[in-house]
Amino acid sequence: MTTLSTYDADERDSTVEEEETERGEHVCPDCGGNLTQDGTRGETVCADCGLVVDEDAIDHGPEWRAFDSAERDQKSRVGAPTTKLMHDEGLSTNIGWQNKDANGNSLSSRQREKMQRLRTWNERFRTRDHSERNLKQALGEIDRMGSALGVPESARETAGVVYRRALDEGLLPGRSIEGIATASLYAAIRQTNLPQTIDDMVVVSRVDEQEFTRAYRYINRELALEIGPPDPANYLTKFVSKVDASDELAMQARDLIETGKDENVHSGKSPVGLAAAAIYAAGLLVDEELTQETVSEATDVSTVTIRDRYRELLEASAGGDAVETNAPSGSGASA
């Protein structure tokens, strides 16, 4: 019983000493005021009397500064974030192609041969079977086409997710990797409302339009992708820039498309053709010299389509009344 009491007393004394020590670390030894940490100078200063209690404190944070998220990701040395654009999601090791050491000095011929052998074996280990090799090829195609079209990385990531879903659902047998990859990228473009058209996809794809559109309809149906019809207004900025039109024309074209949508003019019509017709019709309304041939070449829409659609948009804007317009002279300008 006596031993237990002695133990309790010692434990109580130890606790009191720890509490006093902890309080002493946060109290100024000179005036008893509160201490504050100055991270910029690495000092511990009394807030009341200004006494510097401690200096040259160790900063456990990074030695660099970043002012936005992109700069922070660029300077961070904890590794790249995972990405769906790589078959291993970026979790494997990459050996750089530069034949230089940590000091920037060129490697000897013996070391270069050694590094080349390491790169070869590293590539072999990264793809363990044919399915991973096919996935690597497809994601590389998506990244290549997205880069050529100027598609943002977020949309390319979405395309990678769509392709992985198609692979998991067993939709690839009997179809080309390039065709499903192109269809996945176009599905991501449609989901994010980007202004790329089917003709744009055909230019950068390694498959023809028929194979690409057939693959797109197939994965859209099998994966139950919730993709609505494209909005003609999404193409206006791209087309207006190509014809070098004014902001006034762009706003007028957008108003025509919104009015046409309210009057259900867009139902069953090509959104690209409506956008081209809206630009031509807006040029007539704001007195800008735009011929049908000029708009046709910039938008890759036939003059016949422009001629049919622009009248429908003008009639919808006028409340259904017939509209008399004076088309500007020039090749393809006659209505």
Image (spheres, rainbow, N blue to C red):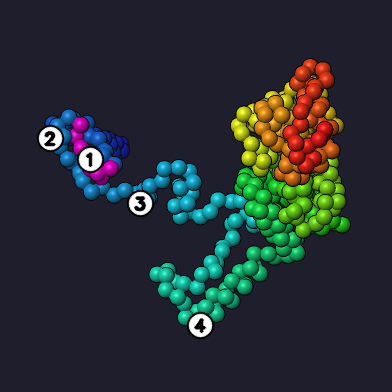
| Residue type at tag 3 | Glu
Reading the image, the residue beneath label 4 is 110
Alpha carbon separation for disc pair 2 and 1: 13 Å
| Residue type at tag 1 | Thr
Mark closer to the observer (2, 1): 1
Span highlighted in magenta in the image:
40-47
Q: Which residue extends farthest front?
A: 329
Q: Nearer the viewer, residue 106 or 123?
A: 106
Reading the image, the residue beneath label 3 is 63
Disc 3 residue crowd, few under 14, some 14–19, many 20+, Cα 10 Å = few
Residue 135 relative to residue 215: left or right: left
Q: Which quadrant would residue 258 be assigned to in this image?
A: top right
Reading the image, the residue beneath label 1 is 44
Of helix, strand and loop, which one carries label 1? strand
Q: Position of residue 97 (x, y in %)?
A: 54, 69
Mark closer to the observer (3, 2): 3
Reading the image, the residue beneath label 2 is 30
Q: Which quadrant would residue 318 be assigned to in this image?
A: top right
Above/below status of 51 relative to 138: above
